[in-house]
Amino acid sequence: MLPTLRKTTRSSAIVPRCLTLLSRHVASVAAKKEGDISSVFVSLSGQQFEPLPKRFAELKERLIQGHEDRLWNSWQRLLNVLREEVATIEQLGSSIIPQIDFQDLRNPSESFKSEHKKRGVAVIRSVLPVQMALEYKEHIREYLRMNPQTKAFPPQEPQVYELYWSPSQILARSHPNILETQRFLMSFWHSKDPKAMISTAHPTTYADRLRIRQPGDAGFALGPHVDAGSVERWEEEGYGRGGVYDAIWAGRWEDYDPWEASCRLRAVSDLYNGAGACSMFRMYQGWLSMSATGPGEGTLLVNPLLARATAYYLLRPFFSPKRAPEGLSKADFLEMDNWVLDSEPTSLLHGATPSHCQELNSTLHPHLDLMKTMVHVPEVQPGDYVAWHCDTIHAVDEFHAGASDSSVMYIPACPLTEANAEYLVRQREAFIEGTPGPDFPGGKGESEHLGRLTADYVQSITSRVGQRAMGLARWNAGLPRISKGQRRMLERANEVLGFLG
């Protein structure tokens, strides 16, 4: 049952002793400019891809210095594998995406587990009842009717709303079934360091936007992209801090493990304070469906190549074609002997621009054959949850050809880490104030919205596990049967969040 919408004010009884800590931390982080989802994409913001500074050429040279031959050999192996995988994806289409019912999460099939680890995408059916998901959507519409000043993209015919704290979003993120689904998905990750300060068994909330896309819309057409930074994937002070992609730079892309978590704890995915750049470790991006939506109806497309696609878009800037595509057949242009390792590295990082997400297209990334390998997720119903690995290339239909709305709440799956706990502190303050979360374009947000829920009220209507995920309640570090790393992480999170003594 959803709460009645009403005028709200700031809560003064949120967490003892935390507000001083909050103000001290928030002051050290630069506020982001006001904006909308178009701020995240060069292709939507009206900007052009500009040449990068010379330091990026020097960076590329350092990354592969001394093992250029191994890199060239690895590129050849990768192109052979991609050719086979493209044919497989073209044949299977959307059926390549593994699916599972919520009721089967505790006993998943071996087929689902192996395919999910290979493809990095999953559809989880019936996470919430259909009627509940539909009520969430109707409540969002009521919230929007009460607050017509809500920012959205495109401004003239809104499809994606700058809403983060509507009652429906808060209740969905904190729902026990959503949190259980996130725990299940994050269990596919592992850590080679048993002492790593991380717990995938304790999801944390990341307040993201929502979409209500209307039939006929062509404005919200997100091309293939990858979240969580762009140039940071190559930079030594970005993902290089954890050595996330070291195997790829060393010419051993087969050894790259996209499911290893400990290396990502030190990685920095937002070096430029970009609008929408993700500073929280999201293992999965994901959304909860609030409509019945099929392929071509304004929905999601994913590239189910995961590790191979990642290796390709990271290695692509080191290689160039001998002959341009003009006058060549597609097969001849893509042929291995038409490509060479650049003798003099350029500053180009194909589709990567500081402070924006990583974008891809068929011109810059031809061997991925995106026209064939970007596949729609299968038809979804209200209450289904779709999730994709944080390195996955994904896109949105260019045109909504369906007859009804395509509506989702973006709800990613995030583990408990020290950095994520620190983000929760800042996000909790944003919740209290009614402003966008720290990663998103700034401004007054929902601070003056009618119907926004107070922290006290949220604590009265959500479960304890949901409150913990939001940073509103203490984690239980005394649980039996948890690892030492998990226990240390829970204790540290309580300290960071201000739950002392």
Image (cartoon, grey):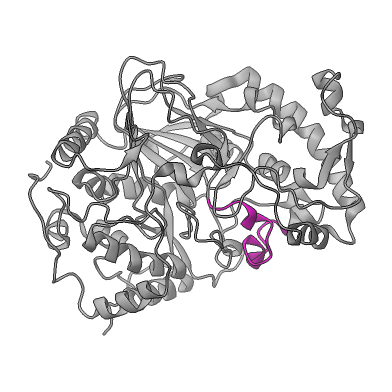
**Could you say which is closer to the camera, residue 60 or residue 97?**
60
Which residue appears at 59% of the width and 54% of the height? 354
Q: Position of residue 191 (x, y in %)?
A: 57, 62
Q: Is residue 481 visible?
A: no
**Quarter containing the C terminus:** bottom left
Q: Residue 414, relative to residue 178: is it above or below?
A: below
Would residue 138 be found to the left or right of residue 387 on screen? left
Q: Is residue 146 visible?
A: yes
Would residue 332 be found to the left or right of residue 20 on screen? right
Report the residue that reaches farthest toward the bottom: 501
Would residue 34 be found to the left or right of residue 235 on screen? left
Q: Is residue 222 magenta?
A: no
Which residue appears at 34% of the width and 44% of the height? 209
Region rendered in magenta? 228-246
Q: Residue 16, relative to residue 245: is it above or below?
A: below
Q: Position of residue 388 (x, y in %)?
A: 50, 41
Which residue appears at 89% of the width and 54% of the height? 68
Q: Position of residue 91 (x, y in %)?
A: 64, 18
Q: Is residue 245 magenta?
A: yes
- Residue 223 falls in which quadrant of the image? top right
Would residue 154 be found to the left or right of residue 318 on screen? left
Q: Residue 16, relative to residue 237: is it above or below?
A: below
- Residue 139 falls in which quadrant of the image? top left
**Could you say which is closer to the camera, residue 231 or residue 130?**
231
- Residue 289 falls in which quadrant of the image? top left
**Could you say which is closer to the camera, residue 483 or residue 275?**
275
**Quarter containing the N terminus:** top left
**Could you say which is closer to the camera, residue 40 or residue 118?**
40
Q: Position of residue 29 (x, y in %)?
A: 42, 70
